[in-house]
């Protein structure tokens, strides 16, 4: 197992942040460091669904985020809602946007990573690229900012793409003096493989900062937590069929000023 000395110490503040709730669904903001569902060991019982169930006993999980990833999760409050929303994830009808701080300067303003993934069994829970046995995994990305240690100024262009409304649409273009050693990217996963975004950015040559599983020492030391946040999620309400979009602020201190444009549902 990777990092056997790791000790699970989930955050207690905030204990539970609910963004939306009605008779059918509940949307919560999961903090980094908290499991989505309980682990097998007694010390891994604390999780987002466990906390939600103390208030909403019928809530069930329809998708997950990695423990180190923060952001939006939707839960079902009844069996029919669970079936309906699960089907949307299965058929890739949901829309998702993540933001990540990655190591180095991503040269292309936009692109895709299409690399099949499989569990790296001797080093689980790590995943790896495997062209013969791996499952299809596709991620679109857009560059938002490239920065040096001294400043956070935009150097990317304001492109609208088929991936969604450009997250940098309201940002000016400027040049950063000195070495550009990190990039803020918007990530649009088409598939939902385990650790997909983390491995895809690693394979692109830009590991996510603070990633204790995949980052090299320099990238790991540049952040105390994994710099990956599930910022937007769109799906059809299981009862009304209305299209809903939920957003939660990017929790990275350096980007507290940054408000992304709404996620396009086209």
Image (cartoon, rainbow, N blue to C red):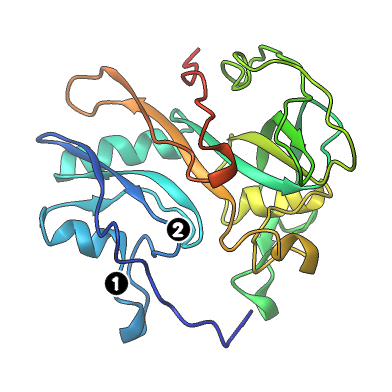
Q: Secondary structure at mark 1?
A: loop
Frontmost residue, 60 versus 151: 151
Residue 46, numbered label? 1
Asked if residue 238 is positioned above or below residue 33 in the image, the reply reads above
Image location of residue 114, percent across then percent down = 75, 39
Name the image quarter holding residue 90.
Answer: top left
* Residue at far front of view: 150
Does 162 sit left or right of 116 as displayed? left
- Circle count: 2
Image location of residue 179, percent across then percent down = 89, 43
Q: Which residue is mark 2?
A: 32
Asked if residue 8 is positioned above or below residue 140 in the image, the reply reads below
The residue lying at 59 percent from left, 71 percent from top is 125
Q: Secondary structure at mark 2?
A: loop
Residue 116, numbered label? none
The residue lying at 58 percent from left, 58 percent from top is 226
Name the image quarter holding residue 157.
Answer: top right
Dots 1 and 2: beta carbons under 8 Å? no
Disc 1: CA contacts within 10 A as few (<14), some (14-19) or many (>=20): some
Name the image quarter holding residue 52.
Answer: bottom left
């Amino acid at each position: 197992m990777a990092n056997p000395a790791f000790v699970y110490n989930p955050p207690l503040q905030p204990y539970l942040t609910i963004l939306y709730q009605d008779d059918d669904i509940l949307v919560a903001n999961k903090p980094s460091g908290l499991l989505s569902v309980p682990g097998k060991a007694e010390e891994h019982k604390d999780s987002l669904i466990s906390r939600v169930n103390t208030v909403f006993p019928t809530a069930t999980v329809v998708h997950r985020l990695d423990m180190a990833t923060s952001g939006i999760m939707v839960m079902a409050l009844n069996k029919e809602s669970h079936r309906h929303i699960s089907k949307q994830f299965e058929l890739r009808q949901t829309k998702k946007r993540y933001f990540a701080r990655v190591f180095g300067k991503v040269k292309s303003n936009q692109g895709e990573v299409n690399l099949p993934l499989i569990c790296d069994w001797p080093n689980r829970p790590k995943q790896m690229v495997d062209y013969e046995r791996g499952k299809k995994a596709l991620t679109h990305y857009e560059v938002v900012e490239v920065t040096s240690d001294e400043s956070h100024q935009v150097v990317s262009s304001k492109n609208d793409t088929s991936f969604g409304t450009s997250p940098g649409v309201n940002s000016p273009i400027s040049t950063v003096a000195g070495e550009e050693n990190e990039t803020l990217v918007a990530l649009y996963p088409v598939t939902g493989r385990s650790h997909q975004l983390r491995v895809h950015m690693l394979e692109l040559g830009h590991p996510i900062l603070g990633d204790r599983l995949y980052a090299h020492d320099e990238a790991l030391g540049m952040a105390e937590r994994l710099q990956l946040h599930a910022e937007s999620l769109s799906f059809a309400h299981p009862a009304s069929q209305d299209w809903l979009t939920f957003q939660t602020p990017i929790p990275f201190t350096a980007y507290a000023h940054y408000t992304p444009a709404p996620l396009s549902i086209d």
